[in-house]
């Protein structure tokens, strides 16, 4: 009798464990999204409603909330490739490595484990498909800048769905030699190339494996910033929705899907708070797509949201016990497009641009003077830059990792941060904690402070990957 009871107990426990196993895994990575990027976005949304506090993003309402450390094997401040490798493989490596340890040995990724377990696999991003974070899930290269070689690893991984802006070096090797285009190589490996959402919808039904990128002629390095988006631009939410539909068609054995909100990092490298907060909102919109799927499969779906590192050393509050994040809503476009508008005006007028014309542009694009009053010191900053770059024709562009910015646009961005009372300690990454949120099957595994290397290990455990 006792033996029968033990057998029944074992069956019940085994069944319960099986029922909680994650058949469907969503792994969201907000590149550069530290704790203050999330908190700042929620306060920014609350101030838009005319109140002090937070308006929660969907992913911050998940029942499990924690934080993770991000240091690499070689430095307390990681780069995206080492952090991406930690998040994909569960191992520390040197800054610059893609899917390799610090001795340049190939590491198995959680996505590769999922594929081995019979799951369909997707790797998606709002930047280029060969960029550091997405690459860390399918490629194995000693240097993140080996874009062509990284792209060649894509068909070798044999994943089912890839999506992003495009590819940075489709015909040029790391040693700057011309090489065969990667696109016919993808097609020979059985991949259908879809350029834009309409093309994807036409081709998806008959495709066995898919690479979805932007329309022909679009900037391959990334999708447009959410703040700059035009009708018809591909979005991260649309990519997520397309990935789900593709990975669940046919024989459905479950899937693993990584989704990167890559341009949070870019905006923070540029110390552009309005653009950064809108990128966090944009990734949350992609999480909402995954959450709708979760609601239909709550006992089989795991959603994990985290970040690879913090970027910019974002501070919420400067000299006063105040914030004025609502002021950021007057910014109509990213500093990149503001910079382009200033360059275009400079060229159109052969550099003979009046101070009144500069003021009119900044009033229109940033709300200066027209909505937001400037202090004497702030107006002097802008006027001094005008004198330097337009009157003296001494134009020194500000350079961040992903942008070269007109000096007037760079100064306007600094003034906007001052008005909002947002501070920045860096134009690069910092060693700050990053958040971890989880919901669904196995989500309790993500309770408590952890290192980033623990996250893929716990995903594999929740999903039963070996």
Image (cartoon, rainbow, N blue to C red):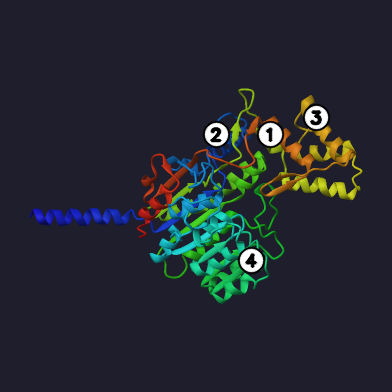
Instruction: Report the residue marked by disc 3.
Output: 379
For this view, does 281 lie left or right of residue 92?
right
For residue 173, the mark is 4
Image quarter hosting the N terminus: bottom left
Secondary structure beneath dot 3 equals helix
Is residue 319 toward the left or the right of residue 70 in the image? right
Q: CA distance from mark 1 to mark 3?
A: 14 Å
C-alpha span from label 4 to label 3: 47 Å
- Mark drawn on residue 417: 1
N-term-proximal mark, 4 vs 1: 4
Report whether 302 appears left or right of 80: left
Please determine whether, in this image, residue 333 is positioned above or below residue 184: above
User: Could you say which quadrant of the image residue 199 lies in?
Assistant: bottom right
Q: Residue furthest front?
A: 103
- Label 1 and label 2: CA atoms lie apart by 19 Å
The reply to whether dot 2 and dot 3 touch (C-beta < 8 Å) is: no
Nearer the observer, 223 or 267: 267
Decide which of tag 1 and tag 2 comes sooner along the chain. 2
| Closer to viewer: mark 4 or mark 3 | 4
Give residue 54's mark.
Answer: 2
């Amino acid at each position: 009798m006792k033996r029968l009871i033990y057998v029944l107990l074992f069956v019940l426990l085994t069944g319960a464990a099986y029922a909680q196993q994650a058949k469907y895994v969503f792994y969201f990575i907000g590149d550069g999204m530290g704790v203050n990027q999330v908190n700042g976005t929620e306060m920014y949304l609350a101030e838009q409603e005319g109140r002090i506090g937070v308006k929660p993003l969907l992913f911050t309402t998940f029942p499990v909330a924690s934080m993770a450390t991000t240091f690499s094997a070689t430095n307390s401040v990681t780069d995206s490739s080492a952090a991406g490798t930690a998040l994909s493989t569960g191992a520390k490596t040197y800054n610059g490595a893609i899917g390799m340890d610090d001795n340049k040995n190939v590491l198995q990724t959680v996505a590769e484990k999922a594929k081995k377990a019979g799951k369909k696999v997707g790797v998606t991003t709002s930047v280029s498909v060969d960029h550091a974070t997405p690459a860390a899930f399918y490629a194995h290269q000693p240097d993140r800048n080996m874009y062509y070689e990284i792209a060649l690893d894509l068909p070798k991984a044999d994943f089912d769905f890839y999506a992003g802006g495009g590819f940075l070096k489709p015909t040029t090797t790391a040693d700057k030699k011309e090489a065969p285009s990667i696109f016919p190589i993808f097609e020979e490996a059985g991949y259908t190339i879809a350029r834009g959402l309409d093309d994807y919808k036409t081709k998806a039904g008959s495709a066995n494996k898919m690479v979805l990128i932007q329309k022909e002629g679009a900037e391959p390095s990334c999708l447009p910033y959410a703040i700059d988006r035009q009708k018809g631009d591909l979005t991260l939410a649309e990519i997520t929705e397309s990935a789900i539909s593709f990975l669940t068609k046919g024989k459905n054995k479950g899937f693993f899907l990584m989704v990167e909100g890559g341009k949070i990092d870019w905006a923070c490298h540029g110390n552009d708070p309005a653009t950064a907060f809108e990128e966090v909102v944009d990734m949350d919109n992609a999480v909402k797509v995954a959450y709708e799927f979760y609601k239909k499969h709550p006992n089989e779906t795991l959603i994990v949201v985290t970040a690879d590192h913090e970027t910019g050393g974002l501070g919420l509050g400067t000299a006063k016990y105040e914030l004025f994040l609502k002021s950021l809503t007057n910014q109509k476009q990213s500093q990149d497009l503001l910079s382009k508008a200033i360059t275009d005006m400079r060229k159109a007028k052969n550099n003979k641009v009046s101070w009144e014309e500069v003021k009119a542009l900044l009033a229109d694009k940033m709300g200066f003077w027209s909505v937001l009053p400037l202090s004497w010191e702030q107006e002097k900053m802008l006027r001094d830059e005008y004198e330097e770059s337009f009157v003296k024709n001494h134009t020194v562009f500000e350079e961040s990792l992903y942008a070269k910015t007109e000096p007037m646009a760079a100064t306007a961005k600094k003034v906007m941060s001052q008005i909002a009372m947002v501070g920045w300690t860096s134009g690069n990454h910092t060693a700050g904690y990053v958040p971890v949120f989880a919901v669904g099957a196995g989500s309790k595994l993500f309770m408590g402070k952890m290192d980033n290397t623990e996250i893929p290990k716990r995903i594999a455990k929740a999903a039963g990957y070996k």
